[in-house]
Amino acid sequence: MSIRAVVWDVDDTLFDYTAADRRGMRAHLAAEGLLARYGGAEEAVARWRRVTAQQWALYAAGGNTFQGQRRDRVRVFLDTTLTDAEADAWFQRYLGHYESAWSLFPDVLPVLEALATSHRQAVLSNSSLTVQEHKLRTLGVLDRFETVLCAAELGVSKPEAGAFLAACEALDLPPHEVAYVGDHPEIDGRGAAQAGLLSVWIDRGAAYAQAAGEVVAHRISTLSELPALVRSDTRFGAPSTFG
């Protein structure tokens, strides 16, 4: 069974979100005079990332709006009461520093080019369309993808099967003809596999817990491994390298 399309996650798969967030927040807190409040840059960034993860999980579970989770990230991080306008303004100042640090991983452009003539390509993200289209346009790769789908507009988030199936529907392809590439072994790897796609986990070295249970995804350590994988489709042949 051949793979005809590759659908991509964005953050920490194509785009180096972790590095940009770290550099951006460090610069923002320095500009706001807040580094000493948290004991230093690393402690402050670690707190911001914990708060982000908590608020994003609440949003993904339907407990908040996209803009609401941004505001609550600021309020919880600062541990203070802010109006919506005040929280929005603080977050916008952070975004200026964050966006100045944006970059693709070095293995991205070569693989997008390598697949350009053989596979259709799209994006499925747990963010919002406004955010991810702006990001991909700024990074110079938006026109590489037929479509960009995001949880905020779909109303369903990864790892739910409905998110992955929406991407397949947008491409008018059955799941077994679509590969999904993402950096999270559970949200991306297991979610895509359980939806029936060829699941590929790009292991960028993040400290995710080892996925439990049945092996479901192909693990790669660089995107340069992807073209051979999707052209051979080892789903029914060689064992997965997940783990």
Image (cartoon, rainbow, N blue to C red):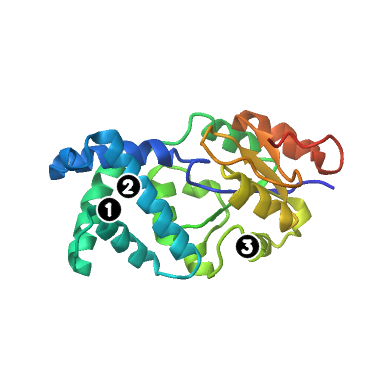
Residue that badge 3 annotates: 160
Q: Is residue 66 above or below residue 140?
A: below
Q: Residues within 10 Å of mark 3 (few under 14, many from 20)?
A: some
Distance Cα–Cα, label 3 vs label 1: 29 Å
Give the percent coordinates (x, y) of residue 238.
84, 34
| Residue topped by disc 1 | 77
Residue 121 seen: no
Under mark 1, the amino acid is: Phe
Whether residues under marks 2 and 1 lie with C-beta atoms below 8 angstroms apart, the answer is yes
Q: Which residue is mark 2?
A: 48
Instruction: First in sequence, mark 2 or 1: give its number.
Output: 2
Tell me: 129 left or right of 204: left
Amino acid type at mark 2:
Trp
Label 2 CA crowd tier, 10 Å (few <14, some 14–19, many 20+)? many
> Which image quadrant is residue 81 in?
bottom left
Q: Name the residue at 23% across, 57% down.
A: 79
Mark 2 and mark 1: Cα distance apart in space: 6 Å
Q: Earlier in the sequence, mark 3 or mark 2?
A: 2
Which residue sits at x=76%, y=60%? Answer: 174
Looking at this view, is 175 or 88 the one in front?
Answer: 88
Mark 3, secondary structure of its residue: loop
* Whole-number angstrom distance, CA of label 3 to CA of label 2: 26 Å
* Residue type beneath disc 3: Glu
- In the rendered image, residue 33, in percent from the top left (x then y), is placed at 12, 42
Mark whose residue sits in front, 3 or 2:
2
Q: Position of residue 159 (x, y in %)?
A: 61, 58
Q: Is residue 100 left or right of residue 201?
A: left
Rendered view: 237 above or below 70: above
**Residue 163 at least partly seen:** yes
